[in-house]
Structure formats: C-alpha cells, structure tokens
Amino acid sequence: MNSFGTHQKIRIMKTRTLLFIWLFPLLAFSQFKSGEDVSISTPQNDDIYLAGEDISVDAKVKGDVVAAGSYITINDSIAQDLIVAGREIIIKGYVADDIRMTGGKLTIDAEVGDDVIVAGGELTITKDAIIRGNLITVGGKTRIKGLIIGMLKASAGELEMDGIVEGDAMIQGGEVEIDGKIYGTSEIVAEDLEIGENAQFHQDVMYWAEDGEIDFKNSLVNATAKLDEGLMGEHEEIPWKFFGIAAFGFWVFYILSAFLVILLLNYFFKPLFTEAVTYIQKDLLRSFGYGLIYLFGLPLLIAFFFMIIIGIPISLFLLSFYLFSMLFGHLVGALLLTYYLEKRNGQPWGYWKTSFIALGFAIVIRLLTFIPFLGFLIAFLVLAIAYGLLAYTIWQRRNKKNIKLAEE
C-alpha cells in the first residue's frame, strides 16, 4: 500500500513537472491574466502573460511582459523584455531590455534600455522617448522625434525623422523627410526625399531619390552627400512604400484566420477537448508519448505509402492532414489550455469567452515561437502535448467502447 502510494506520488510529481515545463513559458499560472479588461495594479516579481480587450500595466514588473489585446497601455516600468501585439499600444513606462511590438497604432513615450523591433501601421517615437539600443521598424507611417543611441533601420511608406540618431541610419521609404540629427553614416533610399532646415548629417550620406540630385542645404557637418544610382535597385526590388502596411495586414490576416479556425475547432470538437484536459494531471506523460509518436511516426508512415504506388493517394491525404495539423497546432494547444483553465475555474465560460481566451493564448504562443531556440522548443512541446492528449483521448474512447461491447 505504501509502495503504491509512493509510486503514485512520483507519477504525480513527474506529471506536474512536465506540465510546468510546458506551461511556464506560456503563462506561469500565478502570473497570467485574461479577460475583457485586464489591469496590473500591484507589483509583479516574475514574468506576466496577458490577453484581453483592454490591457493596462500600472505597476512595476520585475520580469518579462507578454501581452496581446486590442488596447494596451504600459504605464509603469518593466525590468526585462516587452513582447506585445495589439490594435493600439502606448508605452509610457520604462522598459529595461528589448521591445518586440506589432500592431496598428503604436507609440513609445518612454526610455528603453535596449533594442526595439517594430512592425505596424503607424509608429510614433515621441520627443521624450530614449532608445538606448537599435531601432528597427517596418510600418506604413513612422515618426521619430526622440533620441536613438544605437542604429536606426527603418522602412515606411511615410517617414518623418526630426529626432536624434547617434548611430548609423539606413532608411527606405516612399516619402521621407529628415529634419533631425544623424551622427553616424547614412544610407537613404526614397521616392520623395526632403531635407529640412534643422537637419544635420555628421558623417557621409549615400542616397537615391526619384528626383535625382537633392539639395542638402546646410545640413552637412564636415560630411559629403553622394547620389548612388546603385541604390535604385534596392528600391525597385522591394516596394517599401507598401511593405510595412503589408506586414501589418498579414498580422491582421493571421489573427482573423486564427480566430476563424478556433471558432470551428471549438464548435465541432468541444466534447473532445473537454474530455482531453481530464487526462492532463493523471496521464500527461503517456499522452506526451503519444504526441511524439504522432510527430515522428506519421511522417514515416507517409514515406512508406509514397513508396507503394497504390498508396500514393493515401500518402497525399495524410501529408495534407499532417501539414494542416502542424500549421494550426498552436491553436489546438491554445484551446486545450483554455479548457484546462476553465476546468480549474469550476464554472463554464461559454462558447465565445473560451474562443476569445484561446485566441489570446494563440497569439502569445505565436509571439514566443519567434524567440530563437526557445521558440522551437515551445512549438515542439505545444504540438507534442496537444496532439498527444487528443490521440490518447481517442484511444481511451476506443478502449472503453471495446470493453462495453465485450461486456454486452
């Protein structure tokens, strides 16, 4: 009896450990919040993961912040990275490390301790903003009024730069106006290039514009500006005027398509997902093994059928199914995670609430997969556990059905 109890405890500990490894990078339960309105009003000592319609961080966070929503405001300091996606994002609090941001209307009005990478429809770096690393941005319209201590690399349909760049600047766009200071070397490619009265270039400038030679006025400080026709090829190779808008449009398309798939999965497979999460605590390790068999075994089966002429149609069907499952695996994982939290909550959330929360999880998972190496590990664990739970649930259903038939 004691031995049995000990084995049970060990099994539970292993299950919880593996569950912790999977979920910690995503939300670390005690530091996760979701809902229509999400507000952080007390200091946080660890990473936090937020998903909702209206998100506000009004207290200090000592770890990372990962957030996805419609309206997001960062009012207090973040000690590490900020990874955020939303329709409108305003950053007013100090961010000690990197910022990764994508969305519609984006504003940085604070000091950032390291690099900033942004893709969005409209970006504003206010006059009070300080970016101590590099700024890399792709957008429809970009305004830079603050201080960039590192390098500036910007692509935009419209770009206004009347701030200060202490490093090098590489700018490509449709309409570009420079009325600030650049202390490093500059490379500018634009359809329409305008140099303002307050512009200063402290090192040499290489440029190309559709109008040819540009009057740099009194902006060159012990520097020269040279028209380089070779840069025209870079301008023609990529339509920079629309690149930022296309990037934002692609993100919007991803969210909409992901939400549609979540709605369909939630509608047709809710009973399966609800049953699958019941095995998380007691059979997660076994389910994970089923997931490994699916991830590595199905490709071998597809290859086997390809080698048999009569099996080619089957292999093509299985290949399509496998690719689809890989593409939308994080959505399945997001739904399972949502139903697990619903089960822990003890009250049903309803179809639309679970769908919206699952979308928030899906966005967070997708953002995390952009992190080198860790992103691959997260994606692998999400796929293995998600499909392992579903496969194990289907197998258990089959066993129960066979037992029932045998008893009859």
Image: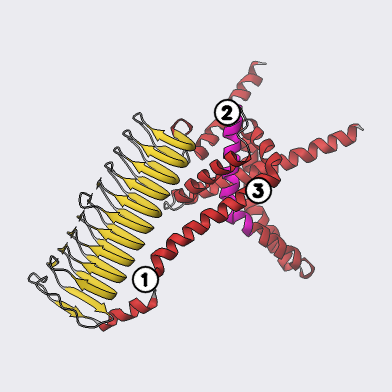
Q: Residue furthest left?
A: 222
Q: Residues within 10 Å of mark 1 (few under 14, many from 20)?
A: many
As for residue 324 lying within the magenta part, the answer is yes
Reading the image, the residue beneath label 2 is 345
Q: Are marks 3 and 1 in contact (CB under 8 Å)?
A: no
Boundaries of the magenta span: 323-346
Q: What residue is drawn where x is 65% and y is 48%?
A: 265
Q: Amino acid at mark 2?
A: Asn
Residue 217 versus residue 254: which sits nearer the camera? 217
Q: Is 63 above or below relative to 168?
A: above
Residue 233 versus residue 104: which sits nearer the camera? 104
Separation of residues labelled 2 and 3 (CA atoms): 21 Å
Reading the image, the residue beneath label 1 is 240
**Does residue 37 appear left or right of residue 173 in this picture?**
right
**Residue 182, percent across and down?**
17, 64
Dot 1 or dot 2, earlier in sequence: 1
Q: Amino acid at mark 3?
A: Leu
